[in-house]
Image: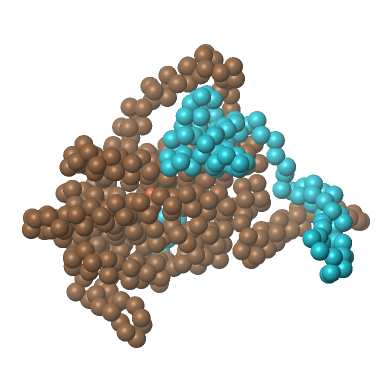
Chain colours: A brown, B cyan
Amino acid sequence: MTLTETPTDDDLAAGLEAGFEATIARNDRIEPRDWMPDGYRRTLVRQIAQHAHSEIIGMQPEGNWITRAPSLRRKAILLAKVQDEAGHGLYLYSAAETLGVSRLELTELLIAGKQKYSSIFNYPTLSYADVGTIGWLVDGAAICNQVPLCRTSYGPYGRAMIRVCKEESFHQRQGYELLTTMMRGTDEQRAMVQESVDRFWWPALMMFGPPDADSPNTAQSMAWGIKRNTNDELRQKFVDMSVPQAEALGVTLPDPELRWNEERGHHDFGQPDWEEFMQGVKGNGPCNAQRMAHRRRAHEDGAWVREAATAYAAKGLDTPRSSLGGNSTTERTGR
Amino acid sequence: MSELPAEGGHGAVPLADVPTGVGVPAPEKEWPLYEVFVRGKRGLNHVHVGSLHAADDRMALLHARDVYTRRNEGVSIWVVRADAITASSPDEKDPMFAPSGDKVYRHPTFYDIPDDVPHM
Ligand SMILES: [Fe+2]
Ligand SMILES: [Fe+2]
């Protein structure tokens, strides 16, 4: 290298930016210690954090039925499923931390209501059939969103998604099998399944977010390779997948506009009630307050356990190296 | 609905202008970060799978089992405090790996061998 002139800060910044853009253009992954634009970093933290929070809050609707599962088999399955969701939350917090945030800080932001989670978890689970419907439709919709995210441009996020997707298949299948079993039961059980599907179908469609025309940020996220498909593309895919599954199950989907469109090779379908969606987002959904209160209480009730473990570690009772000095996020991410 | 991008697994969450916590120092009471490495099965290397927080080494190991090996993903786990790892910096990528870059003669394909020589 010939250094006839010292490069200015602007030259260096332009070089870093060009390197980043080139990596994205090659469809290569950005890794934690790479330089990245601040907007990219913040967009990722916001997305991964809400995703992590959604997994954690998402334990509540189904957790509601663990003690009342109708058999030991169903209880064991539900416990494993809910435990997986906790795991998903942890994989995602771990990915977010590589961007220079701390998990505890993210938890505090959630509890303070400054960061949000998905509105789908603000709907109540009124009957046991909801456990099956959530597995089939809600985890099914999550799979549609998450499979493309396995190829997202940020390495740690993509790797977390690969682990999550492997486990989601169990979630969806156990739900669908539960519903199949109920559909083979009494008229009353079949009615429970239909009623549950009627309640969850539209909220599941809302999970893909507002129509593309109303989602300008999608364009930037797609350019950065954070997002791989638009909201409407994913919603269409989900509807096309679900229709034959509903037929096989013997339930009807509550949409009078739903029909196969030969020309498009896809199903036409109606729009969810976006006003209801907005209300949920604003905190006025059926269970927002309850979900937040529960999360806050769980955090506060766990404080003594965390403190006791810290005190135990500080005494060095377990291992010789027990100092609890400083968090290491800084070293790890170079920030 | 412009303030409502819906990227992320369960979608439909407002993200614009949400505080990120980037650059906020970790709260004092946060447990140290551990990196987790799992040997998938005998005969394979330990591979990095992610990280977690724990109060001490033993808790890190137990948490690693619960978080990263719920389905027989491993036969052995290493955990190591993240602040004990020394890593190469991406900024010095060129000088760091340059010594191997220009030594093409270290690769078998560098050598021309007649096509009719067997087993080589
Ligand atoms: Fe999940
Ligand atoms: Fe799931």
Extreme left residue here?
Answer: A187
Residue at image position (64%, 66%) is A25
Q: Position of residue A305 (x, y in %)?
A: 39, 23
Residue at image position (41%, 60%) is A145
Residue A268 in view:
yes
Image-quadrant location for residue A301: top left
Is residue A227 shown above or below A292? below
Residue at image position (87%, 56%) is B105
Is residue B81 shown above or below A41? above
Tell me the quarter of the image containing the C terminus of chain A: top right
Q: Position of residue A224 (x, y in %)?
A: 56, 62
Residue at image position (21%, 36%) is A67
In the image, taking residue A285 as reference, residue A32 lies left or right, namely right
Q: In terms of depth relative to the viewer, which is nearer, A202 or A134?
A: A134
Q: In terms of depth relative to the viewer, which is nearer, A300 or A27?
A: A27
Looking at the rendered structure, the number of numbered marks drawn on it comes to 0
In the image, taking residue A108 as reference, residue A221 lies left or right, namely right
Residue A281 in view:
no
Q: Position of residue A22 (x, y in %)?
A: 68, 63
Is residue A102 shown above or below B17? above
Q: Position of residue A293 (x, y in %)?
A: 28, 37
In the image, taking residue A100 as reference, residue B2 lies left or right, namely left
Tell me the quarter of the image containing the N terminus of chain A: bottom right
Image-quadrant location for residue B80: top right
